[in-house]
Image: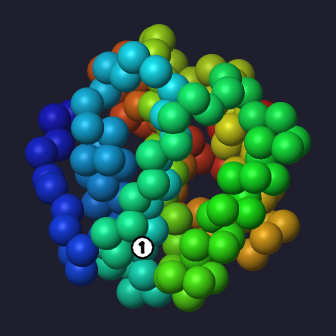
Amino acid sequence: MNLTASFRPGDKVADDGAVLELATFLSGGVLPRERVLTLSWLDADDRVTGIAVPVRDVPERPGSEDAARFGSVIASVTQQSVPGGSVVAMLERPGEQSVTAADRAWNTALRTQAAERGFRLHGLFVAAGGAVRPLALDDAA
């Protein structure tokens, strides 16, 4: 699928297809050379806020301290800057496009943090091997 949509603050992300387009836009290219976790927030009305935080040098698999650190940052930004909003997470990594055990570990870690810290994970995606794929709840490890 070749998605070419671009997003600006205030743009509505109305459905799952639009969230996938946003994730593809955030990836900036689907052949990453390093591991990056990009976090972007939507407001309570599912509109792009313009807040996007790329975190470089993320570990292949999140340890409990990594998960807690990311969960704390996501919860803090959500509560302070986007009350009632949600986060879209894009994990970019080198390698094949198939979902890996490490991707599943990130999925589990971020979903657990969302449940524990009370933020809404609007979508979690992985960009690798020329594709952007959603990671669903049943993809968790």
- Residue name at image x 77 percent, y 47 percent: 67
Q: Mark 1: which amino acid? A: Leu
Looking at the image, which residue sits at the far top? 95
Helix, strand or loop for disc 1 = strand
- Across and down, in percent, residue 70 comes to 69, 53
Location of residue 130 (image quadrant):
top left
Name the image quarter holding residue 48.
Answer: bottom left
Q: Identify which residue is drawn at 52% across, 65% down.
A: 87
Rendering quarter of residue 17:
bottom left
Mark 1 Cα shell of 10 Å, populated few (<14), some (14-19), many (≥20) = many
| Residue 4, position as x, y percentages in the image | 12, 45
Residue 97 at least partly seen: no
Locate residue 35 relative to residue 108 in the image: left or right: left
In the figure, 51 relative to 20: above or below? Answer: below
Q: Residue at x 69, y 33 (%)?
A: 104
Above or below — where is 97 with respect to 20? above
Can the viewer see residue 82 in this picture? yes
- Indicate whether 58 appears above or below 84: above
Q: Residue 46 location in percent, x, y?
A: 38, 78
Write down the residue under mark 1. 42
Between 35 and 16, the residue placed more toward the observer is: 35
Q: Quadrant of the N terminus?
A: top left
Residue 39: x and y in percent read 49, 54
Question: Image check: 19 left or right of 4?
Answer: right
Which image quarter holds the C terminus?
top right
Between 10 and 50, the residue placed more toward the observer is 50
Residue at 56 percent across and 87 percent down: it is 83
